Image (cartoon, coloured by chain):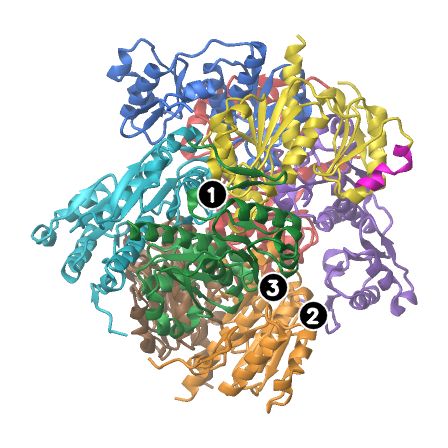
Chain colours: A red, B orange, C brown, D green, E cyan, F purple, G yellow, H blue
Amino acid sequence: MNEPRLDELGFAVVDLDRERRQGLPEIVYGPGKTSEEIAAIVTSLLAGCEGPVLVSRVEADVAASVLGSPELVSGRDQGEYDAGARLLVWRPRPAGTVSLTVVSAGTSDGPVAREAAGVARAIGLDVTEHADLGVAGIHRILGRAEEISRADLVIVVAGMEGALASVVGGLVAVPVIAVPTSTGYGAAFEGVTALLAMLSSCAAGVTVVGIDNGLGAALAAHRLATTLDRRASR
Amino acid sequence: MNEPRLDELGFAVVDLDRERRQGLPEIVYGPGKTSEEIAAIVTSLLAGCEGPVLVSRVEADVAASVLGSPELVSGRDQGEYDAGARLLVWRPRPAGTVSLTVVSAGTSDGPVAREAAGVARAIGLDVTEHADLGVAGIHRILGRAEEISRADLVIVVAGMEGALASVVGGLVAVPVIAVPTSTGYGAAFEGVTALLAMLSSCAAGVTVVGIDNGLGAALAAHRLATTLDRRASR
Amino acid sequence: MNEPRLDELGFAVVDLDRERRQGLPEIVYGPGKTSEEIAAIVTSLLAGCEGPVLVSRVEADVAASVLGSPELVSGRDQGEYDAGARLLVWRPRPAGTVSLTVVSAGTSDGPVAREAAGVARAIGLDVTEHADLGVAGIHRILGRAEEISRADLVIVVAGMEGALASVVGGLVAVPVIAVPTSTGYGAAFEGVTALLAMLSSCAAGVTVVGIDNGLGAALAAHRLATTLDRRASR
Amino acid sequence: MNEPRLDELGFAVVDLDRERRQGLPEIVYGPGKTSEEIAAIVTSLLAGCEGPVLVSRVEADVAASVLGSPELVSGRDQGEYDAGARLLVWRPRPAGTVSLTVVSAGTSDGPVAREAAGVARAIGLDVTEHADLGVAGIHRILGRAEEISRADLVIVVAGMEGALASVVGGLVAVPVIAVPTSTGYGAAFEGVTALLAMLSSCAAGVTVVGIDNGLGAALAAHRLATTLDRRASR
Amino acid sequence: MNEPRLDELGFAVVDLDRERRQGLPEIVYGPGKTSEEIAAIVTSLLAGCEGPVLVSRVEADVAASVLGSPELVSGRDQGEYDAGARLLVWRPRPAGTVSLTVVSAGTSDGPVAREAAGVARAIGLDVTEHADLGVAGIHRILGRAEEISRADLVIVVAGMEGALASVVGGLVAVPVIAVPTSTGYGAAFEGVTALLAMLSSCAAGVTVVGIDNGLGAALAAHRLATTLDRRASR
Amino acid sequence: MNEPRLDELGFAVVDLDRERRQGLPEIVYGPGKTSEEIAAIVTSLLAGCEGPVLVSRVEADVAASVLGSPELVSGRDQGEYDAGARLLVWRPRPAGTVSLTVVSAGTSDGPVAREAAGVARAIGLDVTEHADLGVAGIHRILGRAEEISRADLVIVVAGMEGALASVVGGLVAVPVIAVPTSTGYGAAFEGVTALLAMLSSCAAGVTVVGIDNGLGAALAAHRLATTLDRRASR
Amino acid sequence: MNEPRLDELGFAVVDLDRERRQGLPEIVYGPGKTSEEIAAIVTSLLAGCEGPVLVSRVEADVAASVLGSPELVSGRDQGEYDAGARLLVWRPRPAGTVSLTVVSAGTSDGPVAREAAGVARAIGLDVTEHADLGVAGIHRILGRAEEISRADLVIVVAGMEGALASVVGGLVAVPVIAVPTSTGYGAAFEGVTALLAMLSSCAAGVTVVGIDNGLGAALAAHRLATTLDRRASR
Amino acid sequence: MNEPRLDELGFAVVDLDRERRQGLPEIVYGPGKTSEEIAAIVTSLLAGCEGPVLVSRVEADVAASVLGSPELVSGRDQGEYDAGARLLVWRPRPAGTVSLTVVSAGTSDGPVAREAAGVARAIGLDVTEHADLGVAGIHRILGRAEEISRADLVIVVAGMEGALASVVGGLVAVPVIAVPTSTGYGAAFEGVTALLAMLSSCAAGVTVVGIDNGLGAALAAHRLATTLDRRASR
């Protein structure tokens, strides 16, 4: 067991070894951190790692403040803000050979779907998006079934009753990662209904991440890409 | 307000006025009653009402014992036991003009679907059944969509994630009554997942009854038939 | 299966086929959309459909902004805002022959009851409203029982313990659609208590929609009217 | 503070002071105790207290075994078993001047109602019972409203949606103690729905005890009788 | 059954018969009503009833606005605002002979305890208050046990684990009404923990009202006073 | 859209097209089916499909009865029963090139882990198992970390607090599918605690299936193998 | 990091290093294991460790079978069965200097209290037990307060509303470990109410273990004894 | 039983005896109290007790206002504000001989960890802190295992899935007190997931306090120190 490489910043300990272990630097979770703290962690990751550096769930004003901080303005790598995905990205990877389709059910599932797509794109997946494919209009899904099933894997983002995961899971043979969203009102219970429905899907082999966790779905896709790449390189 | 007509049996008070108010005699809920008690209530209803008399959730041995009880054996109306629906029926109504389709998702939803269909048939609806139409095989549903949409109303019976209600609700324009079942395991939570999913359906205007409540769905269908008949007779 | 008619607006995909399938254009859910987005979707629906166009859950300022948007101001059909129902309506249908009674339990159930009534009226039902009929004053309900039971169907809106659904369900023979509201405090648990109580109603054949879902109840009423109209036109 | 009078039996400590503090000897909860243990506790209470001695939730075979145990057979006070209430009673009090009405909603609420009534009767209340008064048949309740409202207090026993507590609470001015029962299926959730509904009752001033807790309701009635008697004796 | 006396105000239906049925005019629940609406209802109640008129859960600014409204300023009966109880009162009853003790566990239970005490006082009970008697300092409770047990009934107000209800219930023989509060954090779950604990109290015969429902507890006390007064007047 | 190939058996509709769509015949869920029904479905699948035929959750006596049924005894393909995995298998696939490691936390997680491993093996994955690696003895896991991380994907099976998913997820870069089990007592709440913990894992990109759903995890692995095989064959 | 000492038995991996790390051999959890499996694990632990060997939650017949198994009958250390604690023990430690008091609320909390006391005694704590100290009879607790507060730590075992933990926590200054039990019915919800109440205790510094987890409380006591012993030996 | 020494301030009753009973003056819970009320209680405690006086959960502006209040500015003991722990402290104890390690999982667990550490330090424990030791980077924990295990006891603070408690509990032999935090989103459910996971920990003998209850963990540590000190002084 090697001594882990850590950067102790006082308010946080940055794990510089994550990249070696998992093929990707630690992704910074934005909420609850000041823009100074975010800038310091990003600086540490840019210096200590080689891959893409991402900060998730960043509002526009915080993003501007981070991008304008002295240590980052003067750095070699310039960051970009993806407002739809609420994501800050430095050193994005070019699209590789692994293809991902992100399918979402309604307009209000958009932010979560865009987070999943934005992160996946930044870390090198070849991403296609299909929005607004609710199961109440089943023909819309069927019209795109063939196109969807050509991807290496599919992320399904849905709130309310989350039925889209079951329908897509029944249509395609590749891995389906379901993301329940907190969309809906009343008996949707902040995403719990969609979460339970996806876990109980009658389409076998669908797996699930936490509510609104677009980032987690993208990282699950990254794990899959790791295996695909590893086998391709043998 | 008229004085209500009641038959006080000691262990129960039979509401003989229900038929006048609701167009159907009270339906007897079997569990927790002895076969003697059931026979006494049925005898009271046969004497005090004119319409069909039903006992729900009756196991085969209890049914045999009720049917063989002296007061019923010698009665004018002979009862029959519908094992699939776990239902005892006296004086069933002939099929009227109101058509109902009962759609169910998997083989284990069968008992609840058969209860809904059995009760509906006994009280005079014209019932068609479609079983085993899970959304994981969406083409099976689509192949029957047109046939389903010809009914006056549709009952959808599903457990697990209950997505069938949303898909059918999106395909037909007529009333859809969803019945969640306690089918499934793990995160299906004894029907709670299907119940919540159906209440959160993205197919607007779907209504829901309690878990495993096939009887309730059939009686909701009866209410609709009441309105149809009333309008027809104007 | 025909190719579905869709209008892709970038931020949303408008399903122009819904009207053909379900007899009513898609209803726009207001929250989470900008007034520009709402105006664009409404414009698309007015152009691509023939029936009434509705936007639900719209606050007064957003409504004013939508109504004042250039593409709608200059349009052929002028919209109106129903503040009590928080509803924007273009091309309302005249009242048809199907009668609906909306009964609510307390003053705080008002907004949900008005949404149900407002939507139902806009899509052509003949609506009567009875407010403030809590079961703690049971004589108020009984005094109107006969009037209520004359409708083709009844929507019951209640929070707290939701008992009104059981009482009305026992008094009338026609379809009863129950809407639990998030009214109440403490053990009312944001409508969950009323929801569970309505699902467990001892008045058989009552069906339920999600918490605060007045819109859903109105659309369930529309489904019923569809069947009634279809039979009337045979 | 006096030294408490306790009888230590090894497997249990009998609190002989309860009678002085609360006007009634400790009531023995039957389940989980052997008939030998019950007999020993009863013997201790008969010797150390003066009032009625009760054992609740006793099945018939255990009751027979307790009544036949040597120390009790030879005792001065002979016990009786009330099968309906599943109650063993020694030294019941004669009916006093405090009147209690126990109202229940359906036949399956019977056992809990009978426990409440049986305990109340044994400890000296003047008890009247009204069974099978479900709110779906509201006229049955109204027909007895005047009679019910003459009691000093009312216990309402109901499962399913528990609406009877609200209706009775609105009809009478005296104390109403509501007992939810685990009756019902599906969304009744073993009495939780009735419990929540009763706690959220729109009839003000209704109080609630735990699910199926007929004994607790009877003891709440005893507390009230204590106050009434204390004031009468001033 | 007499025709009920109702005052239809458009936005609300005032039940003027409540006083005859329950011995107290309807109590107005403040939240969600404008000060104009409150003033109109109060005016209606002052005109149509004889007893005390109360409005609960009123913040100071709304109270001032209601008290200053033209129809009330010029009225015969002048209202008063009890800030601690957040209560508006017209025509309070003088203290009668029925004594009530309100016991609360911690300083943050104060508002609920004061609501219970304020309402009870306004409707004619003779109220004593004991605050800050948490069970972690059990000697504080014991030091006042005798005084508490002299009341005709006791209201116990407690949040967190709600243990005070069990301790007081074990010390006194008179009725104990427990009010769980939403005090506490973490596993107190907004009062659910205290509610469940009070319903499961090992002190038999304790009854419970909803979370934070001080008003409900006071009205339960009023029901008891009704019985006491009725018996006294025989 | 092709016409789906279905085999209607009366009590069930067998979807013979599943194999074409998903690369694997439908897997039969044993519970709730008689051995005659299982035998009929298996016979239909053996005739209509080419791949492996599996029945899950079969107890030993049912398995023997199915294997001994006339139509199967005389068939070309002979079935085998895997008692540890409670699985019946006909025509298992030989191990392919995709490697899977199944890691489980405690001895009581065994049955679920064996179901996952058994199904995966039968459908052609190259499976390795590591049992009894609870996180309370973290060194056991670390000692095998390198071996585990060599697989193409990892299934983690754990009950109680489900922490093993987070630890393994942090150690390996490949896909991790977590299966919560209903192991544990008290606050483990039949697997809910492990389920929630796995969904909240701090190890990013872990995905989850339903409680005790070893079969689902194996089928998720099959989806991954489908992508791997498809890419290999390009 | 040393190589961990493990004994791989096929169906289980015995962690022989636990004793070095935690001062106590692994404790075997009985349920779900055959008596042969238990005997094999015990044999392994007796051979590979030096301290006491315990098996928890063993019913009498399994215990007899384990004790009579060939490898254990002929062993050097003879086991004993403690029926009250459902515990098998080999090589118990003599009582050390650390004193523990186990306090329980009612007779039905006995089995959990006896498990806590039995395990604690077997691993060398000096244990005193106080049973049947429910808070409804608060004087019983106060009479023993001084004796209880003399212990080095206290375990409080209670079901129903779990108030005993708060009362004892307020009386003593030493560590209090609370064990909720699944005692009670209705709103006790299988121990959840007691669990939540103990976590919300107003007596600061009380810590909690899982429902019915007497074993866990005893091992928490062992951790404290470890610190005490370590300090004593410095 | 001595008469308890209480200071009645009108809005609160200060328990001056707590120090004698529990070795520490009552700790003031800040939220919901005005700075005047806090100042009055602190003044009472400084006068009536001898030990440290603490106010928890105080925001910076309230703290400044309390510290600047006339009665405290002129007092003998000057208070200090610990912003990280949101704690006001007067008369802190010097570090004694009992050592405590506070371990936390992520940066967002910081505030709770700092409250635990701040309170513990103020009441005389010798505190070390280790932050940001999430289990997804298990090597970080292992690298500090030896140092952590040297403490007399350990507090583990973690949100999300709370797995850190199990890992640390398996590494050290001394008491481990786990504090779940409301960190995390989606299925973390405001700390409930971490709470349940810690209560179900596979590392035996871990005890738990309420969600975010850093103060409670510090006071549990104080209880342990009381026992250690008491034994040392014998």
C76 over H110 or under it: above or below: below
Q: Is residue F135 visible?
A: yes
- Residue highlighted by disc 1: D18
Most foreground residue, G145 or H101: G145
For disc 2, the neighbor class at 10 Å (few under 14, some 14 to 19, many from 20) is few
Q: Is residue C1 left or right of residue D124?
A: right
Of circles 1 and 3, which is in front?
Answer: 1
Q: Is residue E6 left or right of residue B195?
A: left
- Does residue D175 belong to the magenta stretch? no
Q: Position of residue A221 (x, y in %)?
A: 64, 41
Q: Position of residue E72 (x, y in %)?
A: 11, 52
Most foreground residue, C167 or A159: C167
Magenta region, main secondary structure:
helix
Q: Is residue A65 left or right of residue F42?
A: left
Q: Amino acid at mark 1?
A: Arg
Q: Is residue D96 left or right of residue B99?
A: left
Q: Chain of mark 3?
A: B
Q: Quadrant of the C terminus of chain E?
A: bottom left
Q: Is residue C24 visible?
A: no
Disc 3 secondary structure class:
strand
- Residue highlighted by disc 3: B158
